[in-house]
Amino acid sequence: MRLYLIGYMATGKSTIGRKIAKRAELPFFDTDHMVEEAEGAECADIITYAGEEYFRAAERRALEKTAEQGSAIISTGGGLPIWGDNQAWIAEHGVSVYLKRTPEQIISRLSPYGRQKRPKFRGLSDEELLQFMHAHLAEREPIYSKADIVIDCSEMSDWEIADRLVELVTKN
């Protein structure tokens, strides 16, 4: 089974994905990392210098490479499911899990570096960031919610979420 973790930026997709992969003894792939390796640059720089369309095409190529894997845990970029038919593609090739968090929870998870490396967050005050996230997440929620599994992360630690998903992966 390929398990695709989707959700907004900084919801813990990579962190939780690594935990699941380690416990389930499965390979882990991060589409952002795959794009950076293929392009030889950080995602933020690709978006800044080559544009979002170019970045999204590179992201799709990375997504398609995950279909070459057998069972695996895949963390996707926050915008990947939103772009084109990526969410439908994910549904065809694996099981999707939406890690759902509130903007307040996401902000509390962000380090100063995490905030700086995301172009859409740069230069925003705390209040502006919160307003931006509420609006941006509201736009994305209808697509994220199409996931096979939706996990409300508000009452669970990353380890509890990982444990729950390990059970799913190891049963199938």
Image (spheres, rainbow, N blue to C red):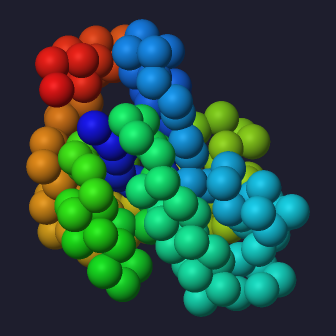
Instruction: Give the vertical position of 123 relative to 3 (above or below).
Output: below
Residue 101 visible, this angle: no
Q: Quadrant of residue 117?
A: bottom right
Instruction: Give the vertical position of 169 relative to 29 (above or below).
Output: above
Q: What percent of the width, then of the height, locates residue 19?
A: 46, 18
Residue 69 visible, this angle: yes
> Residue 151 or 125: which is nearer the viewer?
151
Q: Quadrant of residue 21?
A: top left
Say which quadrant the N terminus sits in: top left
Q: Is residue 162 left or right of residue 156?
A: right
Q: Write the residue at 33% across / 42% down.
A: 2
Q: Write the residue at 42% across / 56% down.
A: 67
Q: What percent of the width, then of the height, locates residue 152?
A: 18, 35
Q: What percent of the width, then of the height, locates residue 77?
A: 50, 57
> Residue 113 or 37: which is nearer the viewer?
37
Q: Write the residue at 13% across / 61% down.
A: 146
Count the marks: how many? 0
Q: Is residue 121 left or right of residue 23?
A: right
Q: Residue furthest right?
A: 40
Say which quadrant the C terminus sits in: top left
Q: Write the residue at 24% across / 17% down.
A: 170
Q: What percent of the width, then of the height, locates residue 17?
A: 45, 30
